[in-house]
């Protein structure tokens, strides 16, 4: 399969991360997939935002889990990035899934369960993907690998990926032990050995977050299965130049 380019939180180099305009710009640029983060509000609605709190990427304050959907949707998620993006809202997961389904893109949904145990998040995400017939176009990733086991219990056929930052000993074997079907490593940990041995077990490797062109070239030449990047056009250009 050809190397895929996933837009990390949308085309976040040129638009506010995890907003609909960032995802639309990724689609327009030709990204193959969208990477995004999911939290639950106080009233158990799935919203797309990276942090546990609103402060960094909106003009609001507070923890997502302590706020209602109405309160989260009221804040401005765009003006921190630039005046042109004033009025952007924190998206619902359903909005991003609908966009990907409409335009034929893959999804990489990161469950933000590693710091907050959102009860039932795995089941809610799977139900949403089933509603849009997107199970086969989605990989679900998480730093909490117990959460990935729960995903597989709900939906054995969905692609799941361990996320990790530090070097793991034989991550291909660890992935098999956890029961996942893909590996999403932090970029410096990718080696030719881990790619060879992961691919021998049919485990795709999609490193994050690849923003420097030199590193894009290195990883493309090594044979990764995807690049997760803020810089969509640069990654697509590198892919074209080395194809």
Image: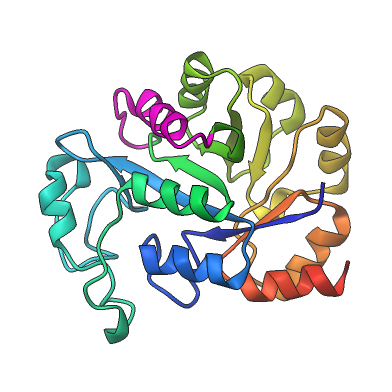
Look at the image and say whether residue 121 sits in the magenta stretch.
Answer: yes
Q: Nearer the viewer, residue 10 or 106?
A: 106
Provide residue 122's location: percent of width, then percent of height. Answer: 40, 26
Residue found 76% across the figure and 30% down from its top: 172
Q: Residue furthest bottom?
A: 83
Residue found 81% across the figure and 30% down from its top: 202
Provide residue 29's location: percent of width, then percent of height. Answer: 59, 72
Is 66 left, or right, of 55 in this rendering?
A: left
Q: Is residue 111 above or below residue 6?
A: above
Q: Quadrant of residue 42?
A: top left
Is 62 left, or right, of 125 in this rendering?
A: left
Look at the image and say whether residue 132 sits in the magenta stretch.
Answer: yes
Q: Residue furthest front?
A: 102
Provide residue 37's location: percent of width, then percent of height. Answer: 41, 48
Question: Start and end of the magenta stretch?
Answer: 115-134
Provide residue 124's location: percent of width, then percent of height. Answer: 35, 28
Figure quadrant of the C terminus = bottom right
Is 127 left, or right, of 225 in this rendering?
A: left
């Amino acid at each position: 399969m050809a190397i895929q380019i996933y837009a990390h939180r949308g085309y976040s180099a040129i638009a506010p991360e995890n907003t609909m305009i960032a995802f639309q710009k990724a689609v327009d640029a030709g990204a193959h997939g969208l990477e995004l983060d999911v939290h639950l509000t106080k009233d158990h609605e799935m919203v797309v935002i990276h942090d546990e709190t609103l402060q960094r990427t909106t003009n609001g304050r507070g923890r997502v889990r302590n706020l209602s959907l109405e309160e989260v949707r009221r804040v401005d998620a765009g003006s921190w990035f630039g005046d042109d993006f004033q009025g952007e809202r924190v998206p619902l997961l359903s909005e991003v899934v609908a966009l990907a389904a409409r335009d034929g893109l893959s999804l990489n949904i990161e469950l933000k369960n590693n710091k907050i145990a959102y009860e039932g998040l795995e089941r809610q995400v799977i139900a949403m993907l089933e509603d849009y017939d997107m199970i086969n176009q989605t990989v679900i990733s998480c730093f909490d690998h117990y959460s990935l086991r729960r995903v597989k219990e709900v939906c054995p056929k969905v692609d799941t990926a361990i996320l990790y930052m530090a070097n793991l000993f034989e991550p291909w074997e660890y992935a098999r032990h956890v029961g996942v079907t893909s590996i999403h490593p932090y970029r410096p940990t990718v080696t030719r050995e881990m790619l060879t041995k992961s691919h021998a077990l049919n485990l795709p490797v999609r490193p994050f977050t690849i923003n420097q062109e030199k590193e894009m070239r290195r990883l493309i030449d090594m044979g990764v299965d995807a690049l997760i990047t803020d810089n969509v056009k640069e990654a697509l250009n590198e892919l074209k130049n080395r194809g």
